[in-house]
Amino acid sequence: MSTTVAIVTDTPGWHGARLRDAFRRRGCDAPWLQLQDCVIDTRLPGGVRLPGFGGRLPDAVFVRGIPGGSLEQVVFHLNILHILQALGVPVYNDGRAIERSVDKALTSALLARDGINTPPTWVCANRDEAESILAREFAAGHRVVIKPLFGAQGEGVQRLERAGDLPPAAACQGVYYLQRYVDTGESRGRDWRVLVAGGHAVAAMQRIGLDWISNVARGGEVRSVPLAPELAEPAERAVAVLEMDYGGVDLIRDADGRIHVLEVNSVPAWRGLQTVVETDIAQLLADDLLRRRLGRPALEVVS
């Protein structure tokens, strides 16, 4: 019987198609698994039903995307991953790793606790406290970035430069995530995305924004860069701290030359990165899962 690796995604798209092809080249079945269609059923031996799997479980799960929704929906989706992991199904990345990275507050706290250089960050639910933090930062000559706790691709990110810039509580779901703005000394945003898999940095690109935000989804330009130790080492440490199988780490260098870890993504897109590196990223990730989580050689190509 061939190995079955379920690809968790709400919309297969470019990344899902590349992953499916990569697993199939290694002789694996790679069906889609949509978490919103799964059912927790305590009458079943494993307690979960996966549509399209005929009562069986996959040999492994590759998490390519987690559907959004209400808090209850997100918890439900992650619970499916937790149950599969508890049943002995390797989940790449597992639910705990996703929880640690999808919540920017927890990510920042864990990185700082481990001594990883990351910008000073404050998270609070009290508006008076948020205004007090801003007042101190502005008085010290700093600017501040506010981000949604759960968000990606630069959506909802704002740079605050004066007290009146603080948005209403409803605009940030009642929680203020405030991070000191890293001044690069340039007018356009410039940072790096490093992909880490199996504990090792495997690819990197530089992103240059149209303005101070450099995300590719916001029109950022991507360039190939060498995977230098100053980029690889903090990226590998960040992914290790969050106990992730793979991750996309965003790094930035300030005007004094110091590297900071900005964010860590447990479900990173790599379409932009693929345009500037020769490595087949989907194949690299598929092989890492097969080798480390299933213990099988992953280099034999099946035509």
Image (tube, grey):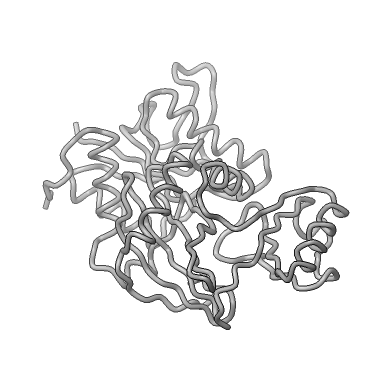
For the view shown, which residue lies furthest in the right direction?
A: 128
**Up/down of 34 relative to 130, above or below:** above
Q: Name the image quarter holding residue 137.
A: bottom right
Q: Nearer the viewer, residue 256 or 117?
A: 256
Q: Nearer the viewer, residue 50 or 222?
A: 222
- Quadrant where the N terminus sits is top left
Rendered location of residue 46, percent (x, y):
45, 20
* Left or right placement of residue 133 versus residue 67 in this view: right
- Look at 33% across and 49% down and name the residue there: 197
Rendered location of residue 145, percent (x, y):
68, 65
**Up/down of 2 relative to 235, above or below:** above
**Up/down of 183 relative to 290, above or below:** below
Q: Name the image quarter holding residue 70.
A: top right
**Up/down of 208 relative to 233, above or below:** below
- Look at 80% across and 68% down and name the residue there: 139
Rendered location of residue 79, percent (x, y):
55, 32
Q: Name the image quarter holding residue 13.
A: bottom left
Rendered location of residue 42, percent (x, y):
54, 18
- Look at 37% across and 57% down and name the residue there: 195
